[in-house]
Image (tube, rainbow, N blue to C red):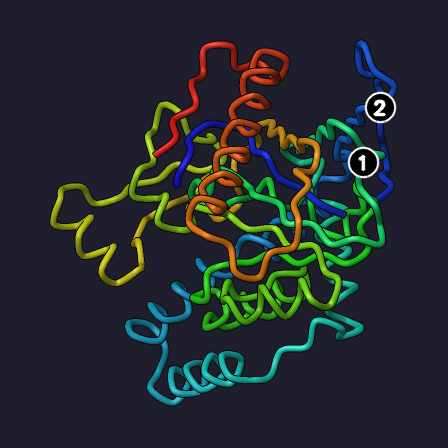
């Protein structure tokens, strides 16, 4: 399943530097809007580079090792990358958590990212939730609003499931682990849910990149992707979608474009370890209906009245 647009039904994590509370019409439940605070440019740029620059940094190191560095220096660089590729990850690392809090504090206001919660009081801090976040786009940057270090939602334990490829990428794997990301495997999903963690998943995953459209994606990045059926078939077979993307001045720093993440009310389910296909399809249908309703409700409010949601 994929969806294109600039709104997402997703979320997670409590408190904020700046917040706005709005009473919903015709009801007692309160809708909440959280907005990232804009800080000094140098710190913001540093946070963005740490958060989003890992892929480009590794590519530059590889190119420099191949074409610029002396053989001895190139060997040291490659050895360093391999070391950071295999060193065990620790999401509780003291300095790592400080870096994660720095990123979350200073990056949110750059775009800025706003989080709209339909019913804030519907979320119980003692329960675990599964959030379906759409769309993936080049990078699901809006998911930052859901990080527990940001603290917009009252969920103290939360993880974001990401492509396993992230956790084979030197430096990036450390930063994103500290930010609360884990590899998107069934084992991780079950394990963390069982331990009481809420989990954020992108149902369409990285394969949504195959269906991106320049007219309906977020403008945070410019991007180019090979076309044609052969490319699509190869990418699906490899479960890997190569794409070239760049931000401001050709750097990994994304363009400053407002983002809105919308969280709907929880869909209550009964625990069922062996659901039938019909039961799965019923819940899937509820999710799609809720996603479409959120999109239509908020697209005009957030400045995109002519945008259309495409579900694949």
Residue furthest bottom as drawn: 72
Find disc 1 in the rendering and name its residue.
122
Q: Residue at x 68, y 41 (%)?
A: 268
Find disc 2 in the rendering and name its residue.
29
User: What x and y, as percent, mark residue 292?
Assistant: 51, 24
Determine whether, in the image, residue 34 is placed left or right of residue 164.
right
Q: Residue at x 18, y 57 (%)?
A: 234
Mark sitting earlier along the chain (2/1): 2
Instruction: Determine crowd level at label 2: few under 14, some 14-19, many 20+ residues with C-alpha closer than 10 A.
Output: some
Does the CB distance between marks 2 and 1 fall below 8 Å?
Answer: yes
Quadrant assignment, res 62:
bottom left
User: What x and y, as percent, mark residue 94?
Assistant: 80, 73
User: What x and y, as percent, mark residue 126?
Assistant: 84, 54
Query: For the residue labelled by badge 2, is the local secondary structure a helix, a strand or a loop?
Result: loop
Determine whether, in the image, residue 303 is placed left or right of residue 309.
right
Q: Residue at x 62, y 45 (%)?
A: 131
Query: For the residue labelled by badge 1, is the local secondary structure a helix, a strand or a loop?
Result: helix
What's the distance in space between the residues labelled 2 and 1, CA to CA? Answer: 8 Å
User: What x and y, as percent, mark residue 155?
Assistant: 80, 50
On screen, 32 above or below 171?
A: above
Instruction: Determine crowd level at label 1: few under 14, some 14-19, many 20+ residues with C-alpha closer than 10 A.
Output: few
Quadrant assignment, res 138:
top left
Q: Quadrant of the C terminus?
A: top left
Q: Quadrant of the N terminus?
A: top left
Q: Residue at x 57, y 14 (%)?
A: 303
Q: How many marks?
A: 2
Give the label on residue 58, or none. Answer: none
Q: Nearer the viewer, residue 304 or 11?
A: 11
Quadrant assignment, res 295:
top right
């Amino acid at each position: 399943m994929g969806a294109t647009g600039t709104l997402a039904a997703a979320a997670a994590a409590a408190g904020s530097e700046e917040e706005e509370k709005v009473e919903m019409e015709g009801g007692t439940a309160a809708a909440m809007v959280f907005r990232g605070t804009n800080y000094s440019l140098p710190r913001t740029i540093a946070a963005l580079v740490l958060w989003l620059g890992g892929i480009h940094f590794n590519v530059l190191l590889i190119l420099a090792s191949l074409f610029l560095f002396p053989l001895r220096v190139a060997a040291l660089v490659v050895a360093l990358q391999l070391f950071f590729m295999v060193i065990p990850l620790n999401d509780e690392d003291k300095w790592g958590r400080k870096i994660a809090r720095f990123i979350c504090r200073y990056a949110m206001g750059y775009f800025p990212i706003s989080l709209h919660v339909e019913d804030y009081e519907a979320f119980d801090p003692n329960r675990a939730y599964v959030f379906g976040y759409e769309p993936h786009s080049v990078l699901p940057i809006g998911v930052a609003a859901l990080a527990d270090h940001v603290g917009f939602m009252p969920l103290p334990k939360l993880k974001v499931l990401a492509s396993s490829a992230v956790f084979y990428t030197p430096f990036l794997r450390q930063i994103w682990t500290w930010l609360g990301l884990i590899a998107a495997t069934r084992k991780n999903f079950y394990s963390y849910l069982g331990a009481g963690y809420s989990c954020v998943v992108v149902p369409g995953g990285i394969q949504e990149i195959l269906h991106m459209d320049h007219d309906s994606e977020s403008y945070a990045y410019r991007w180019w992707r090979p076309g044609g059926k052969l490319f699509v078939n190869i990418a699906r077979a490899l479960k890997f979608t190569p794409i070239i993307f760049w931000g401001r001045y050709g750097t990994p720093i994304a363009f400053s474009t407002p983002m809105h993440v919308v969280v709907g009310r929880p869909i209550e389910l009964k625990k069922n370890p062996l659901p039938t296909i019909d039961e799965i399809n019923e819940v899937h249908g509820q999710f799609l209906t809720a996603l479409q309703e959120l999109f239509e409700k908020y697209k005009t409010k957030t400045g995109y009245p002519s945008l259309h949601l495409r579900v694949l």
